[in-house]
Image (cartoon, rainbow, N blue to C red):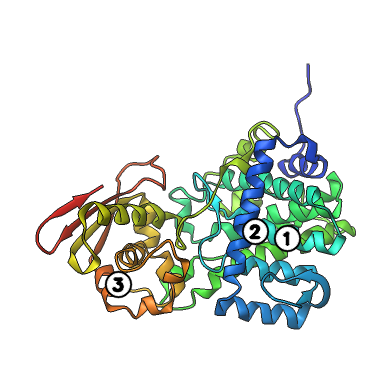
Amino acid sequence: MALPDTRSAAQILGQFAAELAFADIPPTVIEHAKACIIDTTAVAVFGSTLPWSRIVADYATRYGAGGPCSILGSKGARVHAPSAALANGVYAHAFEQDGARDPSVGSHPGAALLPAVLAACEETGADGRTAITAFVVGCEVLLRIAVASHHSRTPPEKLGFHAPGITGCYGAAAAAGRVFGLGAEQMTHALGIAGSLSSGLLAFTKSRQGGMVKRLHLGRAAESGILAARLASIGYTGPETVLEGEFGFLQVYCQDGAVDALTADLRRNWETLHIGMKRYACHMNAQTPVQLVRELMTDGGFTGSDVGDVWVEGVDKLVSHHDISEPGDVMQAQYSVPFCVALAMYRDPDDPASFNASALEDEGIRGTCRKVKLRAFGQKGRSNKSAGVRVQLKDGREFEK
């Protein structure tokens, strides 16, 4: 009879992360990882043009200059790995179009992992297979921790943590550690160190300004992954009970964490396949309402100026987090379901440039935003992709989908 596995979750994940080989990864997983890498790179290059991205890039080049690593979209800039991961992570999360797990568990694997992988590979001269393996390793570790944390459920979402910044550093540490060649014990220490680097608050959703800070959360996660992996590689230690132990991640950040989900079905159920890619440059919970509105406009032949009232029904989080009728900056606008729905009636939401500062000054969009009323489904277990939209025009006609 086999003896029970007495290792901690970090030790099990650490061994997996250290030992997974490119040949062990199914072809479908490799192809999906490549698609996410391509998508994240494109999103980051677009994100590099934005003012909040340039601020962080200036910081990175000032304090990280002289290294071998690139900042995407910045010709000639060469910085050390932590600075590259920071800047590229901010770039990737700069405009709300980076991918997320589907169904949602509060994670952005592309923005958290790819910047750490790119920086570590440039520092070490690693090849493409190593990069893809590291990315998959990071996905498998990150997304299992995110699933176990239940951050997308109530009441934990009421705690006010921005989950991608909290969980992202673990995946980034595993991904960077795989490139750096960490052994199982060192990888466990990297995860233990990453636990003390988790950060990110949702205060920006309830403020009038300061939304830029959300972009920083994924940059810090990627940067923290480099820090944790490199410290572990030279002998720094962290607690092996960091995930499920007393005062560990699940106990401190969660209210109903699922310990078994941390290591369930490793090498059998590939979390990498659950990465979804966004169509619109706005929050995941606004994706379906925006799509429905565009379809209703096509069906009914109306425009934003014809609209009297709008009702959007969705998961509880629509009301608790995304009912922002007067966004004060672009970040809040992209986080606001009413604003995104209103914008889709006046601009092409397929164009990420539609979600810019001028939209905040558009009286048509502003006025329609105030007409959008949100309500919850009133039942648990619904997917965050599920939504219903009803539009009443000024002439009395109604359209619903």
Residue 254 at x, y = what percent?
A: 55, 50
Callout 3 touching callout 1 (CB < 8 Å): no
Q: Is residue 20 visible?
A: no
Near-viewer residue (244 or 96):
96
Separation of residues labelled 3 and 2 (CA atoms): 32 Å
Amino acid marked by disc 2: Ala
Amino acid marked by disc 3: Ile
Residue 371 at x, y = what percent?
A: 22, 66
What secondary structure is found at the residue carrying circle 2? helix
Find the residue positioned furthest to the top: 1
Q: Can you identify the residue that label 1 sits on?
A: 116
Q: Is residue 98 left or right of residue 142?
A: left
Find the residue positioned furthest to the left: 395
Dot 3 crowding, Cα within 10 Å, few <14, some 14–19, many 20+: many
Near-viewer residue (54 or 219):
54
- Above/below status of 389 relative to 258: below
Give me the residue at 43% from left, 67% from top.
334
Question: Which of the two labelled residues, at mark 3 and mark 2, occupies the earlier sequence position?
Answer: 2
Separation of residues labelled 3 and 1 (CA atoms): 38 Å
Q: Which numbered mark, 3 or 1, is in the foreground of this view?
A: 3
Q: Can you identify the residue that label 2 sits on?
A: 112
Give me the residue at 90% from left, 60% from top.
234
Separation of residues labelled 2 and 1 (CA atoms): 7 Å
Residue 101 at x, y = what percent?
A: 55, 48
Q: Quadrant of residue 374?
A: bottom left
Callout 2 touching callout 1 (CB < 8 Å): yes
- Above/below status of 146 relative to 260: below
What secondary structure is found at the residue carrying circle 3? helix
Give me the residue at 63% from left, 33% from top.
269
Q: Can you identify the residue that label 3 sits on?
A: 365
